[in-house]
């Protein structure tokens, strides 16, 4: 009887493990191959070789680019090189990326930038919020942009017990923001188990010097986050659930769910066109390829534009897609005046004229 019971328990455990593995592969779109969609006027941006994970463009056409992310489980072309913030002026005929100098006193050696967001204050001061992972921890670094000499002045490092595994931020004030925690755990093994078991413990946190609180929860992996041009709605990408959530923002900074747009791809960062309200997102058609360093089968790239997301039937258009021969692991796409920038987790960056 004991042997029969033991065999039954082993069988149940094996069945559960197989079911979890299948669900995990489905969340990663492990079998999907992308059909190519070409853009005619594109070229790789010189000088960006180790990622362009997030991009944020000011209304005047200055684009900030975070580069050099080292993320657990993903490859890096320069694992020992500190991260960087690049700047591009998209008003130039041939825009070039240049590294921004960061003020003394900031620990450049452990700089590991992830998501970024800009905020323009009433006096036209430009603040840059940067998710940072020094020594695989999570902080948010606040900088002031000095346009006269293309530099960043570090103002402060933000840490909090609720900011455990920060992926992206959207600034809503000179020292306040919403942040996504893409995992509940920060340890790599526990993060993997969290994904494998399909735990929906990821969340969104509101931070200000006076108040820090969870404002949304129940995500597989909350990733990109942004705000509508009228400041009424917050958009959140759940990368492992293949969707974008629309949340209404209230006066007390709490969020309530409005709708969810389901996609067939892993949406990463979200950018919002300030003129049209369209959402642009860099996507991973097959997330499994991100975790395998196979030069013969690299992670593909995909860019979507979402129009009228509040409508009953939003329009989703695939703007760009390719198999990784040009661009690997697209994480962001953003537009300015007929120009499109496409960034990646750990690879190159693409400049296109639409």
Image: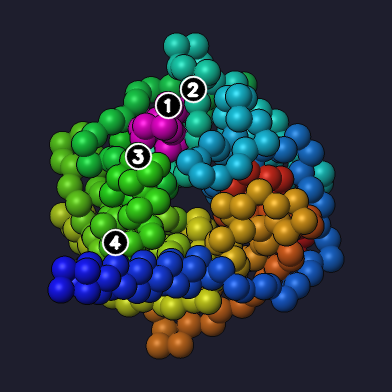
Membership of 337 in magenta stretch: no
The reply to whether discs 2 and 1 touch (Cβ–Cβ < 8 Å) is yes
For residue 199, the mark is 4
Quarter-of-image position of residue 81:
top right
Left or right: 159 as drawn, with respect to 328: left
Circle 3 crowding by C-alpha within 10 Å: few under 14, some 14–19, many from 20:
few
- Secondary structure beneath dot 1 equals helix
Quarter-of-image position of residue 15:
bottom left
Separation of disc 2 and disc 1 at Cα?
Answer: 7 Å
User: Range of the magenta residues?
Assistant: 128-144
Separation of disc 1 and disc 4 at Cα?
Answer: 25 Å
Q: Position of residue 284 (x, y in %)?
A: 58, 62
Separation of disc 3 and disc 2 at Cα?
Answer: 18 Å
Q: Which residue is mark 1?
A: 135
- Secondary structure beneath dot 3 equals loop
Is any atom of residue 334 visible in this view? no
Q: Which residue is mark 3?
A: 187
Which mark is nearer the camera, 3 or 1?
A: 3
């Amino acid at each position: 009887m004991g042997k029969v019971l033991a065999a039954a328990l082993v069988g149940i455990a094996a069945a559960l493990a197989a079911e979890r593995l299948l669900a995990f592969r489905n969340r990663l779109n492990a079998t999907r191959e992308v059909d190519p969609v070409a853009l005619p006027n594109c070229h790789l941006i010189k000088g960006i070789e180790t990622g362009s994970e997030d991009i944020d463009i000011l209304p005047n056409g200055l684009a900030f680019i975070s580069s050099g992310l080292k993320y657990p489980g993903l490859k890096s072309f320069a694992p020992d090189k500190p991260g960087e913030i690049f700047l591009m002026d998209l008003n130039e005929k041939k825009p070039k990326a240049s590294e921004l100098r960061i003020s003394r006193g900031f620990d450049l050696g452990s700089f590991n930038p992830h998501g970024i967001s800009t905020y323009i204050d009433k006096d036209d001061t430009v603040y840059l919020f940067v998710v940072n992972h020094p020594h695989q921890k999570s902080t948010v670094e606040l900088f002031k942009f000095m346009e006269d000499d293309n530099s960043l002045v570090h103002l402060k490092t933000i840490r909090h017990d609720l900011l455990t595994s920060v992926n992206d931020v959207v600034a809503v004030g000179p020292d306040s923001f919403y942040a996504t925690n893409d995992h509940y755990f920060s340890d790599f093994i526990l993060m993997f188990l969290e994904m494998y078991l399909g735990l929906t413990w990821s969340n969104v946190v509101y931070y200000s010097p006076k108040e820090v609180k969870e404002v949304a929860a129940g995500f597989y992996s909350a990733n990109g986050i942004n705000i509508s041009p009228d400041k009424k709605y917050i958009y959140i990408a759940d990368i492992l659930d293949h969707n974008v959530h629309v949340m209404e923002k209230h006066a007390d900074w709490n969020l309530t769910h409005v709708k969810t747009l389901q996609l067939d791809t892993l949406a990463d960062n979200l950018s919002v066109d300030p003129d049209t309200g369209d959402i642009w997102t860099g996507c991973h058609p097959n997330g499994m390829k991100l975790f395998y360093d196979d030069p013969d089968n690299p992670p593909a790239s995909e860019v979507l534009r979402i129009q009228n997301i509040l409508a009953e039937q939003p329009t989703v258009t695939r703007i760009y897609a390719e198999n990784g021969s040009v661009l690997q692991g697209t994480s962001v796409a953003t537009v300015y005046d007929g120009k499109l920038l496409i960034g990646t987790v750990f690879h190159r960056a693409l400049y296109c004229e639409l």
